[in-house]
Amino acid sequence: MPELPEVETTRRGLRAAVEGGRIAEAVVRHRGLRQPVPRGLEQQLAGATVQSLDRRGKYLLFECTRNGHRSGTLIVHLGMSGRLWLVDRDTPPQKHDHFDLAMDHGRVIRLRDPRRFGLVLWQRGPALEHPLLRDIGPEPLTDDFDGAQLHRETRSRSAAIKLAIMDSHLVCGVGNIYANEALFRAGIDPRTPSKRLSKARCDALAREIKAVLGEAINAGGSSLRDYVGSDGMAGNFQNNFLVYGRAGEACTRCGSMIRETKQAQRATCFCPHCQKR
Ligand SMILES: [Zn+2]
């Protein structure tokens, strides 16, 4: 599933091709995504200019203007299997290519989403007031998120710390892979009740969340299943995983065997020696 680094990699890869560009045409081939693609979206987008391509959590926000005035925001979410990338205008669509944004300059931003858990929506009012966006917690890579905030928000939470940092109300965009990796790097057992973490350990965890997400973005994301960046190139951060997907292998720090368990149906990988409650 594309996580925050993959979405941010996609945004950076597409920015130059869309920002300031005019949309020639939008093509919807399948409206049955996680929510139906709104009727009339094609008319909203044709002829509009993309002022900026932003990201909030795992949502991509194409801010559109028409005749110099803001007309709305195209909101795209990649769901479980979505991929948004650039193709030439004459590239024939394949079976799971559900949405195209054809730019005036001849290139096309194409959404491929075999499992159709993605979203293509239109928001006329301010993008951040959309029901899916307005309750999202702070961005992990900004100063809105730090150890003090994490400590404060976990004082009354008994749930395991891994589940807390994956709760998008507390901090957005920390998915399963990067939660596993950040907890290992901070030396924290993923099953630790959140409220038992000291301020110092919250500081360490917030620092490692930022570090691992930043490194993954710099590496172009992680290539899992068939994720590739907007330029069609595979990211390579999966080569840097220290615990995720390494159950049964030796810990790179202490040599103990990495263990795997499940939390909320998701795989948790950790080193029982390096990670303490
Ligand atoms: Zn270890």
Image (cartoon, grey):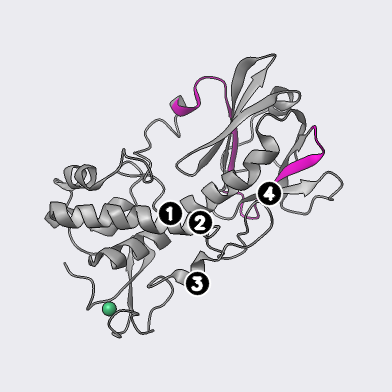
First-in-chain label (4 vs 1) = 4
Q: What's the amino acid at mark 2?
A: Asn
Which residue shows up at 63% across the image and 59% down it?
Answer: 228
Most extreme residue toward the right is: 90
Residue 116 in the image: state x and y as whole percent. 61, 49
Q: Which residue is mark 4?
A: 85
Instruction: Tell me the amino acid under the disc marked 4.
Output: Trp
- Quarter holding the C terminus is bottom left
Residue 126 is inside the magenta segment:
yes
Residue type (three-letter) at the residue carrying disc 1: Gly
**SS for dot 2:** helix
Q: Which residues are magenta?
A: 104-128
Q: Earlier in the sequence, mark 2 or mark 4?
A: 4
Q: Are marks 2 and 1 in contact (CB under 8 Å)?
A: yes
- Mark 3 = which residue? 239
Per the rendering, the mark at residue 101 is none
Crowd class of label 2 (few under 14; some 14 to 19; many from 20; radius 10 Å): some
Alpha-carbon neighbours of circle 1 within 10 Å: few (<14), some, or many (≥20)? Answer: some
Report the Cα–Cα distance between label 3 and label 4: 23 Å
Tag 2 residue: 218
> On the image, numbered disc 1 is attached to which residue?
214
Residue at left offset 44%, top offset 58%? 215
Work out how far the residue at label 3 is from the one at label 2, CA to CA, in angstroms. 13 Å
